Image: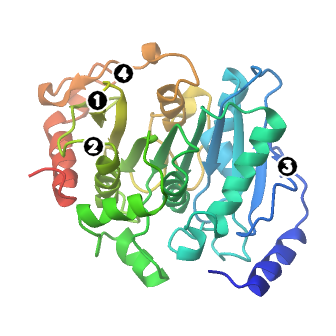
Amino acid sequence: MRSLSDTVERLTRMRSIKPGAPSGSRLQKLEGFGSNPGALGAWYHMPDQLPETPALVVVLHGCTQTAAGYDNGSGWSALADDYGFAVLFPEQVRANNPNLCFNWFNPGDTRRDQGEVMSIRQMIAAMVSRCGIDKRRIHITGLSAGGAMANAMLACYPDVFAGGAIIAGLPHAIASTVPEAFDRMRGHGLPDTDSLQASLRAASRHDGPWPAVSVWHGTSDKTVVPENAAAIVAQWRGVHALSDHPDSSGIIDRHSRSVWRDANGADAIELHLITDMGHGTPIDTASGYGGRAPFMLDIGISSTEQIARSWGLTASFERLPKMAPASQGANTGPASASDWDGNKIQSVIESALRSAGLMK
């Protein structure tokens, strides 16, 4: 846990930063949202046209990124303008982490009502109070360290969120030091399923209902290996009381999607493995949302659009290609069947699931 003097010092440094919005950004500074024990910055966007009680999406950038940079790359605020929901962008500062990574590996920043997770929780409370946010429709997403911190938020405050999307992230509470963090990113020393699920249950006193979780990962990610994606699924499978095998697996736009459904038939966990993609957020510049940047990978799939649709924030899935069973090896999307190998994708899914003990 951080000392009082450390918190004061970091807050002082943060407040010395000029609060003006970055050039060309839609974002506005969120001020005075609470005690801010994690000494984070905060930005938000409220479109002109909003319903009386709008939904909120919390978006966490990755290492070396800023809130405005990640927004420009991912297109979240542009999507919010078109479909009428609010967006909140917590932002790391160099006084906390020289590489602008959220400190997902620091126990003092990832325990309920402490450090950075508490700061983000305070930002959300301020948005709810000031902007009339619908408490039933609060969602969170993030990339890499931001994805790991999004998972920490879901674990520590499952009562706050309807759903979360973790992109190239890591399970909650698997590291407590920087060397351990690098080991887990490489897939070394990942806990077994029982330990992963115990860490999630210990993060809060919540007993349900639990937020739906969407996991996105590139199959060629060498920075945070795909075994972490399977481990996130394993971690959340316990609280949702789901079996180790997905209820369905198929292909959308040349990438695989596996789904675990709850007792009511709703999607509780989904795993997207993006074929041959490295470390980053999948975007589709042709969609009009987002743009190429470091770790913003234009591969013809807009994770922003698909995540928002899965949360019911945009139009239905009618414009998305229908999902073909992976065993058929047939693609109903824009690319021809010769452009990909369905059996290869299915073997990648099964390999990742087995590595986390999700499939025998």
| N-terminal label among 4 and 3 | 3
Q: Is residue 86 above or below residue 220?
A: above
> Which residue is at a point 36% across and 58% down the rendered structure image?
221
Q: Position of residue 98 (x, y in %)?
A: 66, 77
| N-terminal label among 2 and 3 | 3
> Which residue is at a point 69% across and 65% down the rendered structure image?
92
Q: Is residue 35 above or below residue 333?
A: below
Q: Which residue is disc 2 drawn over?
A: 241
How many angstroms separate mark 3 from mark 1 (CA)?
Answer: 48 Å
**SS category of the residue bearing label 4:** loop
Q: In the figure, residue 135 lies in which quadrant? A: top right
Q: Is residue 146 above or below residue 350?
A: below
Are circles 2 and 1 on residues that touch, CB within 8 Å? yes
Res 23 label:
3
> What residue type is disc 2 on?
Ala
Q: Nearer the viewer, residue 119 or 248?
A: 119
How many angstroms separate mark 2 from mark 4 (CA)?
Answer: 36 Å
- How packed mark 1 is, by other alpha carbons closer than 10 Å (few <14, some 14-19, many 20 or more), is few
Q: Position of residue 182 (x, y in %)?
A: 42, 76
Apparent side of residue 176 relative to residue 3 in the rendered image (left or right): left
